[in-house]
Image: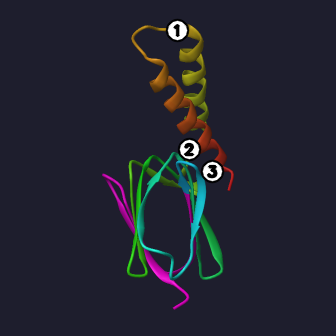
Amino acid sequence: MTAYNVEIVTPIRELKFQDVSYLRCPGLDGSFGIMSNHREGIFALSVGEIKVYQDGKNEYYATGEGFAEIYNDSVKLLVESLEKSNEIDSNRAKNSLQRAKQRKTEQNSEINDARVEASLTRALNRLRVSKR
């Protein structure tokens, strides 16, 4: 078998792909690729880019954290958020980046550093993927 099925699930949407040749996911220790007959397992995902190669074409998605489960020649991704590269509102992402940068310099005690860093990471990722 040279292809497999992929299902991506978020709290608000579900995407299904058939006959995927290659999937690249953002793991905690860097990106990893999945081809047919990949070893089964569960992997933690980080904020980053998902690449789906299907029918000779690449599709790119900005994603939040989550998990990938590989089993029986299929892959299921459970992620916080998912946006296709051409669906990302670049202006909104730029505004989010500016807000996050401003919050980082303000040292506001109500917003902790971890939240500010997470906002920066998400905004930068969305901008990068939107250019695909």
Question: Percent from the top left, x then y, of residue 108?
Answer: 47, 8
In the image, what residue occupies the spot 46% across and 46% down? 64
Q: Distance between the residues labelled 1 and 2?
A: 28 Å
Q: Which residue is drawn at 56% across and 77% down?
A: 35
Considering the whole magenta stretch, tell me its main secondary structure: strand
With 10 as the anchor, is 31 left or right in this view?
right
Marking on residue 18: none
Residue 46 against residue 114 in the figure, above or below: below
Task: Estimate the spatial distance between the alpha carbons at disc 2 and disc 3, rounded to whole Å.
Answer: 11 Å
Q: Mark 3 points at which residue?
A: 129
Real-space CA distance between mark 1 and mark 3, rounded to the nearest whole angstrom: 29 Å
Query: How many residues crowd mark 3 within 10 Å: few (<14), some (14–19), many (20+)?
Result: many
Query: What is the image's colouring?
Result: rainbow
The stretch drawn in magenta includes residue 7: yes
User: Which amino acid type corresponds to the residue marked 2 in the rendered image?
Assistant: Asp
| Label 1 environment density (alpha carbons within 10 Å; few <14, some 14–19, many ≥20) | few
Name which residue lies at 30% across and 52% down.
11
As drawn, the residue found furthest toward the right would be 131
The amino acid sitting under disc 3 is: Val
